[in-house]
Amino acid sequence: MDAYRHIPCHLFHANEPRASFDVGPVRFFSRMAWAEEFLVEDAVRANVLQAWEEGSRWSPDEALSVPDKTKVETVLRAIGHHGWIGSVLVQGHDAESSHAKANVLVDLAIDSLNVMLPPSDGILLNRAGVAFFPGGVRLATTTQGTIVAGSSARLPGLGGHPDRFKEFLAETADFRQAAGHVLASYAEAHQDGLDAAWLIERWVNALHWFGGARREDSDFMAVVKYGCALDILSGAGGNLREMTEYVEATFGITEATDQSGRTVMLEDLLNSLFNDGRSALAHGESFGLLNDRSTDRARADVIVRQLIESGATPLGQAVRDKDRILSVDKDSQMRAFKVRLRGLSRERAGKSPPAE
């Protein structure tokens, strides 16, 4: 059937009560805006809004019919304590696969927002059913028997001053538009049971691995997932030289500076992070459960996040313009795209772009 699927989310704490915005095929609504858009029956909508306002003090309107009461209870159970809903139209699928595809698309839309946030804020955005880093009470005793207690709290959703939501939307407008073009093309292709263009598939799947790395509890598994994101995005197939070429084309650099101020060749840095790191950990050549990989994780996050962000604009423009780059064979797609990335990096550095 054709249906709008509605996936509850944690996005922002302080927001306009009737706020909404798009990321490609997904439209995110605050609860009030969602109710006014999709709850077309007046009695049902009024009771849902009243329940959200009154919380545990709410009781159904006595005049509410039994069928309408069931609808209200269904909405309240489905949305729960989430403040936002991601809605997406899925056409021509059975109920199970329709809901599964909607979950994937909402995940990707949230991960695209995640790209524009530091890790500590990015992991606060999630949809219902996705693992979240909870707070809690920590208990320990010293060797002398003294009880030591601590606690932490991490509320889901992005907090801040009342205008933070508007500021975030303004700051991310260009990126969200570009990412939205890519995600819309991806969703359209898969709606018909096809793969999207090769560059689009790679960008979207890299975005998925990036989001997974951000939400990963252990540093070593995060490094593995960041490595997968880079490998997929660059089309390198594990080849260090091709991986390095893609990063060089995007950033316009051949070396970097580490935390100690030492100059490191880009290929050596990527080899350390994604081959000695990702591959060795994934294949059991080294082990990471109790090893401190926080520095590797932070470096990998910076690299992959900026690669995804930098690739979104030219790729989104190619989708918007129906550029023939998306219709040639996959090797030609990657070669042409790296030329464009290199040209953009030179523009940012104030240099003349290379000739086509």
Image (spheres, grey):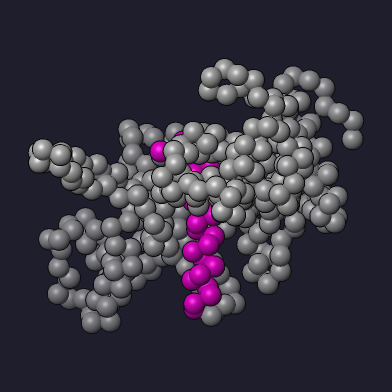
| Residue 270 is inside the magenta segment | no
Query: Residue 40 at x, y = what percent?
Result: 38, 68
Left or right side of 80 for 226: right
Query: Residue 122 at x, y = what percent?
Result: 44, 42
Query: Residue 72 at x, y = what percent?
Result: 28, 71
| Segment colored magenta | 95-120
- Seen in the picture, residue 120 relative to 99 is either above or below; the reply is above
Query: Residue 211 at x, y = what percent?
Result: 51, 50
Left or right side of 6 for 197: right
Q: Main secondary structure of the magenta part?
A: helix
Which residue is drawn at the image coordinates 49% and 77% (left, top)? 96
Left or right side of 84 for 264: right
- Seen in the picture, residue 15 relative to 31 is either above or below; the reply is above
Number of numbered discs visible in the structure rendering: 0
Instruction: Compare residues 160 and 303 and report the one nearer the observer.
Output: 303
Which residue is drawn at the image coordinates 49% and 78% (left, top)? 95
